[in-house]
Image: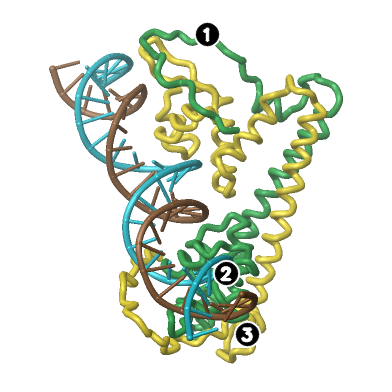
Chain colours: A green, B yellow, C brown, D cyan
Amino acid sequence: MNIGDVAKATGISAKMIRYYEETGLIRAALRTYSGYRVYSENDIQTLRFVRRSRDLGFTVKQIDDLLTLWRDRDRASADVKQIALGHAAALEKKMRELKEMTETLRHLASNCHGDNRPDCPILMSLGNIEPEAPQPQRRDRSKTRGFERVS
Amino acid sequence: MNIGDVAKATGISAKMIRYYEETGLIRAALRTYSGYRVYSENDIQTLRFVRRSRDLGFTVKQIDDLLTLWRDRDRASADVKQIALGHAAALEKKMRELKEMTETLRHLASNCHGDNRPDCPILMSLGNIEPEAPQPQRRDRSKTRGFERVS
DNA sequence: CTTGACCTTCCAACGATGGAAGGGTTCAGG
DNA sequence: CCTGAACCCTTCCATCGTTGGAAGGTCAAG
């Protein structure tokens, strides 16, 4: 399988696949005599894992740690277990926090649904923000403040 | 409260606080006559929220969206609800995937615990990777491949 | 007055990603 | 067999977002 096929199969651009190889995230692919990279099903699975992780917001470094986990089964199993459990715990913490945020969001959504009464406690705590308080612009502060918000 | 105190209180560097202000993520702080930024408890809460979100892997843009949600209670409430629910759904999807990964990790940890038998199905599927297959290095491929892995 | 905190502006850097240039390889169809 | 399209290769450069550092200057408080 050539890199293009893999790109199609995994949703990772050929560019990034090469980059991942260069930085050591994935092992260097075998090559044909002419230098073309060739990939196995296994490689594709690995790359799919990478993609999933990236989508989840993991940094390449973190993914590297994870991949090292599966790969290094020559390492002391206790180590692997330790690390894996550590990662799992971290992920679960992240999940809890994510859940918290989700709940906050849902709370926001349900509490401020149809009327515009400012009685939503979240708005109270985070939002009572005066629109444009006239700042005491003592000195020339008219710099480059028209920043391009891509929003 | 000066920016230094806020930095201490929120764990965000003064540098980044100014940056967030400059890019519009947070509202421009009020100023003393001499130009010092002054912050309220509210600002601190907002910044804590920002920090939490950053830790969770949200991009500044995404946080901006979220913050806009609480702030813009003048907007049509239906909109806000819509967006909030959309975000919540996305977060929950992320959580599910995170959960999947966590389970995979735990699975890995428990299946490859004390012995070194390579019978872990995850290792089977992701890991049967020959260590250093002698590549057919046809042409001069001895470039800058000693890349600095900070690991 | 001196020291530490603040201000701005500019520059550097990193991680992740894409693009273009310049050149070889593959393979189907003429 | 030849050739052109579609790949692939490398190298260099550019961007975007986030973060830090240094320089040069003002301000606050002991």
Q: What separation in Å lies between label 2 and label 3 (alpha carbons)?
A: 25 Å
1 or 2: mark nearer the eye: 2
User: What is the quadrant of residue D19 in the picture?
Assistant: top left
* Furthest residue toward bottom: B117
Residue at disc 2, secondary structure: helix
Rendered location of residue B46, percent (x, y): 58, 31
Q: In the figure, is residue A92 to the left or right of A62?
A: right
Dot 3, how many residues are within 10 Å of its Cα: few (below 14), some (14-19), or many (20+)? some
Number of numbered tags placed on the structure image? 3
Indicate which disc residue A134 carries: 1
Q: Are marks 2 and 3 on the same chain?
A: no
Rendered location of residue B109, percent (x, y): 61, 76
Q: What separation in Å lies between label 1 and label 2 (alpha carbons)?
A: 57 Å
Which residue is labeled 2 in the image?
A: A4
Query: In the image, what residue occupies the spot 66% across and 66% down?
Result: B101
Q: In the figure, is residue B98 to the left or right of B133?
A: right
Above or below, C3 relative to A15 = above
* Residue A85 in view, yes or no: no
Which residue is labeled 3 in the image?
A: B124
User: What is the quadrant of residue A114 in the picture?
Assistant: top right
Q: Amino acid at mark 2?
A: Gly
Above or below, B117 relative to B31 = below
* Residue B90 in view, yes or no: yes
Q: Amino acid at mark 3?
A: Met
Q: In the figure, is residue A53 to the left or right of A106?
A: left
Q: Chain of mark 2?
A: A
